[in-house]
Amino acid sequence: MSDPAFSDSIGAQWQTLARDAIRLSDTKFLQIYALLEQLGDKPGIAGAFDAMRPRLTQLRPPRRPTVSRLFFRPAEDLFDDPGAYTRRLQRISRGTLPTCWKLVRARLDGKLVDGVAQGILKADPRDPRVMAKVAAPLWEAGAHALVVIANEAENNLRFMVDNFGRDDDVLRQVQTLRDVLLLGGIIEDLKQRLPERPIGDLAESHADAIKGVMAQLGGAENPQAAAPVLLVLTARMLRPGVVLKMLTDMRVTGSSQAERDALTRDLSGVVVGNLLRQTGSIAKEPEPGAAGAAPLDPVQKLGALAAVAERLTDGLTSVNDSVAILRDKKIVDRVSAARSEIGEFVLTTVLGDVEKTLAGLMYAANGGVSTPPDEMKRAEATALALRRSAKLANHLGIQREVNAKILEIRREIDRQMDRMMSAPGARGNPEVRRQMFNNLRLMEILAGSDEAERLYREWSRRLG
Amino acid sequence: MSQVKTLDTSPGTFGERGIAVPFTTPMLSQARMRPTRQGELEFLLPSFTGGKGVYIMPWRSLPTIMTVTLHDRLLYEALLDLKEYTPDTVRQASLTVQASGVAGGDASLAAEKTLALELGYRALTHFTLVTELLKLARLDAGELLATGITGSESRRLIRISLGQLAQRANLPVDEMVTRVEVLANLMAPVGLPQCQQLGRLRMLLGELDRTRASLQRWGTTDFSEVSQLAAFVADTAKAALDMARDRLARLDNRCRDLGAVAGDFRAFRAAVAEDVTRMTWLLDGWPFLIRLWDSVADRPLETQQSTMGELFRLAPLIPAGEGGKEPSAYDLETLSKIQTRWLRMGEDWRTGALDMTAVMRIEALKATAS
């Protein structure tokens, strides 16, 4: 199996198989995925997973923990698909991981790896605390192995080229990975004590947990020691500016102040850079039916896109202060451009045909007066996506356009209600009443409860 | 009474504690309602700012603090129409509003289903009661049992059977019919001990016991300070369970001798009503908390921890005047501090603006069971 040509051929076959699997039904696709999972880290499998990833992202099957997956877990928030990876943002390309693991695995004590594998089998994979205990020696030994690998790559060009190519950026990725893994236990423990990602607001206990870790690692004397933790943390936060502010507010002494300020600047640059990178890529969402992606439900897609826009807008707003700290006009301009870009994105993707989507769901001929329950749920999800966009409108400078869309939808609801209530037999018809409440639901989401109440009184009066 | 007040002392009776109302506005969710002497309704919101005490506010003060959902506005109107305020009448009003569809399709279907099931269970209780009375009087219930619970033939046979019973007891037929109907309606929320199918409150006791055990278990495996909240909520559940079980035992004992239907019915009815009503008060508020805890069973630890804060905030402590522990028995100040530390600012019920996603989470809980 050591013949590279043979390995390449196997890899190509796996990839072809994976691409074929994408055309299968969800159930069959997941069966193939489960079988591939059981094969573990065999040559070529990683390529197959790459081919399957877009569909896996949608289906989100439960993943069986493996030694390699557990090894990378503390850093997983920093991983990007190779196509989306951007340099110098302290991110790690998924494309780097298989080589990293191959090299680390070769340097790890076999007994240690076997022990971890045994531990995984015995532990409940849903209990992250137990899994962290199992993986602790692996992270420590793995981080040290990464130091050796980085040194060898730096001093041995042949080794570097054979394993990573000629691009020095890989070494930066290895360094980021090593820094995070050295604090793997602390990071995983902190993750368990904080809300699920994306983390919205923090409770006092959460803030205390973060401050506790910062103090434990270096405190006021050495704020830099907590940098890997903060890097992971900002990647998990909806508003990473909150963590940056905590860092700015941290009391430091003497020369540590300069160190803290440098760290804040570095981290701010990384956070802002990441938000800008994501903003730049939002318009490049895979089109429904694109290779590897099963056709997305348009309503789900609308909701997902609105959520992305909200996350990025919130993120950018939260780093306003940090951007100011950077005192970099170029970044200020880029942030401002990013806002416009998100605004444009919302206008074209979320607002685009939203009124037609809603009307199609609510009022398409369905054989009855009231909208069927499933269609109604989709209509509510669509209205929620629009409401999300309305919340962002001020920040993005698209208030006028959003208001116009909402007004148009409200008029359509009014027209439909008027038509329905004017029809013979509308009074006392439970279906009409049901549809009245369906329409009120949309009105409440889009125009608020006061307006919904006003319409309820008016429509109830007409229906007697 | 147009201003917000705070209540620093714990309520002494169930009436003072108020009835949990299943509102969908996050900040109002499970607020407790009680009528004032002037006949108005006021609402008690436990520490919604994370501080100490309970806020008491009339409905008209609410819009200055929060945006209230259309569902809650209609529910409030339905509450105003009630002639009597008990956990059961409030529940019925809430289900009727929910069935309209104002809280979404799933919640509406769940409410319709619940209302239909309860109507069916009332008929079953009535039927069981009649057959038990026939057995007691050594009359043949075979024909009635063969006919089943519903339908005009069944109604005719029930009337004939009650006529026979009335004759034995020297009562007018209509009086016997009324007594049985009254007793069936009273017992329907609990169900007769002779009935194999459990009544709503009997099932609720089982669910509460399961939740209590789950909370206790969770508390022993969580190593944060939140485990203290879990212990408190489990303890509160146990107190309600013990007292409700005691009541149920008394009620079942009473119902094993149904001869009282033909005897001193007034006293019997009063005693049964007292037992059932007390059970509804003891268990008031728990169905929502059970569903809330169930909803995070498979969620990460932190989600469970923050939900525990919510359970603590809403846990229906039994008032001291009703047999519960004195509040001083608990270190409520420390527990409140823990709860506050685990609440996320600006989220869910703590924001005045209406967060429709949070509203829909509450509606989803309404849809899981009613």
Image (cartoon, coloured by chain):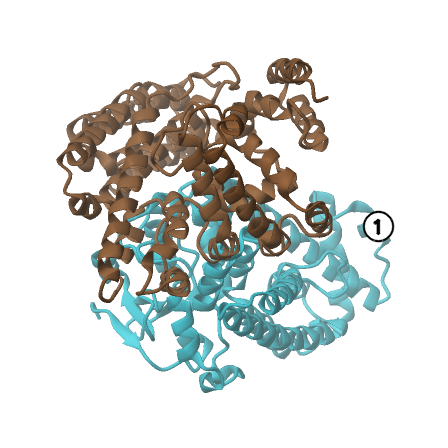
Chain painted cyan: B
Q: Residue at x 47, y 19 (%)?
A: A366
Residue A344 as seen in the image, left or right of residue A441: left
Chain painted brown: A
Compared to residue B344, the image places residue A55 above or below, namely above
Q: Position of residue A84 (x, y in %)?
A: 40, 26
Could you tell me which secondary element the residue under label 1 belongs to?
helix
Compared to residue A92, the image places residue A200 above or below, namely below
Residue B139 visible? The answer is: yes
Residue A412 as seen in the image, left or right of residue A427: left
> Where does the N terminus of chain B fall, quadrant-wise?
bottom left
Where does label 1 land, which residue? B143
Compared to residue B197, the image places residue B229 above or below, namely below
Q: Position of residue A374 (x, y in %)?
A: 50, 29
Q: Position of residue A405 (x, y in %)?
A: 23, 25
| Type of amino acid under label 1 | Glu
Q: Position of residue A283 (x, y in %)?
A: 32, 22
Residue A3, by quadrant, is top right
Q: Residues within 10 Å of mark 1 (few under 14, many from 20)?
A: few
Q: Nearer the viewer, residue A38 or B102?
A: A38
